[in-house]
Image (cartoon, rainbow, N blue to C red):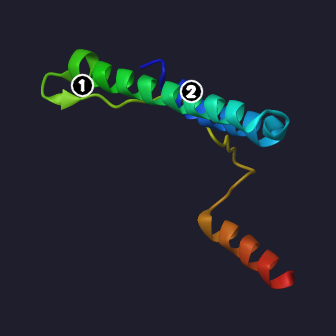
Amino acid sequence: MEYSLIIITTPFVLFLILGLAGSKFKPQLSGIIGTLGMALCTILAYLVAFQYFFQTGKTGEQWQTIIPLNFEYFVFNEYVTLCSLSIKLVLFQSVILT
């Protein structure tokens, strides 16, 4: 299960490498790097699925939830409030004023 974060970040890293420096590589080398990176993601995804379904996933009659990354997105206090309506109003105003 510890491979979940690698599965998520590998395509982004490949995009950065091939998108920013891909023109400096030969087309065949860029294709090989992209294909090997996506093959790595596929193999790791199969490994995580195998571990989940056949080794650690089921406890009793329930399936466990996989949480690849756990952190707080926003930390609010009594002075900072944010609701979906205020976000929609700000986006609407920015569209209208531009």
- At which x and y percent is residue 55? 24, 15
The answer to whether the residue labelled 2 contacts the one labelled 1, judged by CB atoms less than 8 Å apart, is no
Q: Quadrant of the C terminus?
A: bottom right
* Residue that appears at 68% across and 44% down: 76
Which is more toward the observer, 23 or 76? 23
Where does residue 28 sit, x and y in percent of width and height? 68, 34
For residue 83, above or below residue 43: below
| Rendered position, 95 above or below 35 | below
Disc 1 packing (10 Å; few <14; some 14–19; many ≥20)? few
Q: Marks 2/1: CA distance?
A: 26 Å
Left or right position of 32 against 80:
left
User: Of 33 and 41, which appears nearest the observer?
Assistant: 33
Residue at the (66%, 72%) spot, across then down:
88
Left or right of residue 41, residue 98 in this image:
right
Give me the disc on residue 2.
Answer: none
* Whole-percent x, y for residue 63 in the image: 23, 30
Report x, y in % for residue 95. Answer: 78, 79
Q: Is residue 6 left or right of residue 92?
A: left
In the image, what residue occupies the spot 64% across and 36% down? 31
Closer to us: 52 or 36: 36
- Which residue is farthest left? 61
Residue 36 is marked as 2
* Residue type pointed to by label 1: Phe
Above/below status of 14 relative to 52:
below
Q: For mark 2, give the secondary structure.
A: helix
In terms of secondary structure, where does tag 1 sit?
Answer: helix
Quarter of the image for residue 42 reads top left
**Image quarter for residue 50?**
top left
Q: Three-letter amino acid code at disc 2? A: Leu
Circle 1 is placed at which residue position?
53
